Image: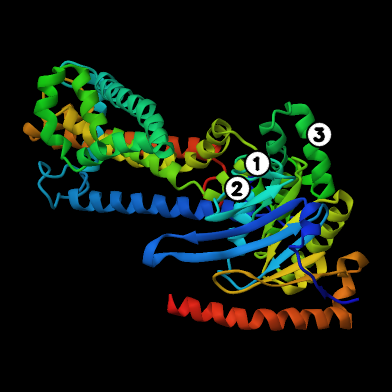
């Protein structure tokens, strides 16, 4: 049993696990209900071969047609490349961008939170860059970084890096002063206070920043594959729309939505297993 | 047996003192917006004294503790512990906070072992020491739990064990039981009295509660409303009796009434200050 499932009150163990499990099951049912309702509405409007569609299939193909398109794409690929290739190319760009953003953004944010001079140097430019629509910089990135994967990775990183860095900085700055004072009064050095108090106390906030930036990263994937490429899952959806192949567009959209959702869940699971103290103050 | 007025700033007391607070004052801000939290204050504590400071909110009693702990710098005056002037936090002064100062990412045992580890003790002896202290505060069975899994009273016990782990020269307690319910508070007060008797530590204890002060202290200081200064100081002997029911004696009730009378007008003044602010 994980620590979260137990609660001690006055020395007595209250087993809340069963109550929590029941609530979880009810939540899952409600969520499944939401998706089922959407699917039913979608089927009703488009007919799905059962009755005449109310909407022209060019605007909205039926779930069955989208499923067929997925099978077709999986078997025959898209524009000479397999569906798996398109998915892995996009995943590669996304993963590279996120790895770089976490490796640079988290340490930078921690330093900004800990040291005023570092904050004075980096925070104003980062805050100034944040409101710029990164899509407007796309042509510049292509000129500067070429048409290869590098420019795609930079396009995705452009909004994600500031978000993670500022998130990590704010996480550090909101660490309770009392905990730091407690560590000081116990004789801890600045270095010990950073590693054993500030960093662990900031981790929940850092995880939140990373999870928030996942959806922005998926959005930027579309921007990154807008031009100067001939593969990727967003590129597939974008080019298919030019041919009014709405079913292929929807397959691409569904894959990106799944990707974003799965990544968010994966980080949530990681968060729960690492920062079990999240929200316990 | 009753309380006797006492001067905590005599040359004799100062000569043999463990802790000396000399001309200590603190003003926050400057110019027109400056707020004088603590007016120049003098007092001396002998080794083994248990001083409770009571006063209305905003009377600077926490400021006094923060300066002794080294978290804040005084505007004037200074604090000496064993003849050495205090300039920053240090392991020879153990601090217990009201709540929320435990490290939730460490087990209870690791929390208590944190001080010795930070002081350079290697892991195994530090853990042994921590286990002994958890035994002392009655939490031996909870060593491997995390602080957030414990009740408020148990968390305060962890805080006390953690502060004791460095074997400090003085314990600084900032309203440690203020967030607890009455029953838990009374039980913990008895245990603190027991721990104080066994360890013989010098204690500076900030509290709102007159009963708590009378029950635990060897000396009580009553502070005025802002700017805080010492309004009265007493020698107290109720804690010598090791009797949890001492609070029912007529002497205790009379002492309680005397201090309540001193505090009441200050609390009223503190409220007026708050309304004006």
Q: Tag 2, which secondary structure? A: loop
Q: CA distance from mark 3 to mark 2?
A: 29 Å
Task: Name which residue lies at 10% across and 41% down.
Answer: A58
Nearer the camera: disc 3 or disc 2: 2
Q: Earlier in the sequence, mark 2 or mark 1?
A: 2
Q: Is residue A43 above or below residue A84?
A: below
Give coordinates of residue A27: x percent, y percent.
47, 54
Q: Quadrant of the C terminus of chain B?
A: bottom left
- The residue nearer to you, when weighing B12 against B48, is B12
Q: Which residue does the numbered mark 1 point to in the structure image?
A: B90
Answer whether residue A228 is visible to the viewer in this image: no
User: What crowding class fits label 1: few (fewer than 14 Cα within 10 Å), some (14-19), or many (20 or more)?
Assistant: some
Q: Which residue does the numbered mark 2 point to in the structure image?
A: B70
User: What crowding class fits label 3: few (fewer than 14 Cα within 10 Å), some (14-19), or many (20 or more)?
Assistant: few
2 and 1 marks in contact (CB < 8 Å)? yes
User: What crowding class fits label 2: few (fewer than 14 Cα within 10 Å), some (14-19), or many (20 or more)?
Assistant: many
Q: Which residue does the numbered mark 3 point to in the structure image?
A: B128
Q: Are marks 1 and 3 on the same chain?
A: yes
- The residue nearer to you, when weighing B249 against A233, is B249
Chain for numbered disc 2: B
What colour scheme has been applied to the protein in the rendered image? rainbow
Chain for numbered disc 3: B
Task: Name which residue lies at 72% across and 49% down.
Answer: B158
Q: Is residue A187 left or right of residue A156?
A: right
């Amino acid at each position: 049993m994980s620590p979260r499932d137990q609660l001690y009150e006055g020395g007595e163990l209250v087993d809340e696990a069963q109550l929590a499990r029941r609530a979880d099951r009810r939540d899952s049912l409600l969520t499944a209900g939401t998706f089922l309702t959407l699917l039913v509405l979608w089927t009703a409007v488009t007919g799905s071969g059962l009755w005449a569609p109310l909407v022209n299939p060019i605007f909205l193909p039926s779930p069955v047609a989208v499923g067929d398109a997925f099978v077709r794409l999986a078997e025959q690929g898209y524009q000479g490349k397999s569906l798996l290739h398109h998915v892995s190319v996009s995943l590669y760009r996304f993963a590279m961008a996120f790895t770089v953003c976490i490796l640079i953004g988290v340490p930078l944010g921690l330093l900004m939170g800990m040291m005023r001079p570092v904050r004075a140097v980096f925070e104003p430019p980062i805050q100034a860059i944040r409101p710029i629509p990164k899509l407007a910089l796309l042509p510049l990135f292509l000129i500067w970084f070429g048409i290869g994967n590098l420019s795609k990775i930079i396009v995705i990183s452009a909004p994600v890096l500031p978000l993670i860095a500022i998130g990590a900085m704010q996480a550090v700055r909101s660490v309770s002063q009392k905990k730091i004072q407690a560590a000081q009064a116990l004789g801890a050095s600045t270095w010990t206070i950073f590693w054993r108090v500030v960093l662990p106390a900031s981790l929940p906030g850092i995880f939140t920043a990373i999870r928030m930036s996942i959806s922005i990263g998926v959005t930027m994937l579309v921007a990154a594959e807008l031009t100067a490429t001939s593969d990727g899952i967003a590129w597939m959806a974008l080019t298919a729309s030019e041919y009014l192949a709405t079913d292929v567009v929807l397959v691409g959209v569904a894959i990106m939505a799944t990707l974003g959702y799965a990544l968010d869940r994966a980080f949530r699971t990681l968060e729960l297993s690492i920062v079990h103290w999240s929200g316990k103050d | 047996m009753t309380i006797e007025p006492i001067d905590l700033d005599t040359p004799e007391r100062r000569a043999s003192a463990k802790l000396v607070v000399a001309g200590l004052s603190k003003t926050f801000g400057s110019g027109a917006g400056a707020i004088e939290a603590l007016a120049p204050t003098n007092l001396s504590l002998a080794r083994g004294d248990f001083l409770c400071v009571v006063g209305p909110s905003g009377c600077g009693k926490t400021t006094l503790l923060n300066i002794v702990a080294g978290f804040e710098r005084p505007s004037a005056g200074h604090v000496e512990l064993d003849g050495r002037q205090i300039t920053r936090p240090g392991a020879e002064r153990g601090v217990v906070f009201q709540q929320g100062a435990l490290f939730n990412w460490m087990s209870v045992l690791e929390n208590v072992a944190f001080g010795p580890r930070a002081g350079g003790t290697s892991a195994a002896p530090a853990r042994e020491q921590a286990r002994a202290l958890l035994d002392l505060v009655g939490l031996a069975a909870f060593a491997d739990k995390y602080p957030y899994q414990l009740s408020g009273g148990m968390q305060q016990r962890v805080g006390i064990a953690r502060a004791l782990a460095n074997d400090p020269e003085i314990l600084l307690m900032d309203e440690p039981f203020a967030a607890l319910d009455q029953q838990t508070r009374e039980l913990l007060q008895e245990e603190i009295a027991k721990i104080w008797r066994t360890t013989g530590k010098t204690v500076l204890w900030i509290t709102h509660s007159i009963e708590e002060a009378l029950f635990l202290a060897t000396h009580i200081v009553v502070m005025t409303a802002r700017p805080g200064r010492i309004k009265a100081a007493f020698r107290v002997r109720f804690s010598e009796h090791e009797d949890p029911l001492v609070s029912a004696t007529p002497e205790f009730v009379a002492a309680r009434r005397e201090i309540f009378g001193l505090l009441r007008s200050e609390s009223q003044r503190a409220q007026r200050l708050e309304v004006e602010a």
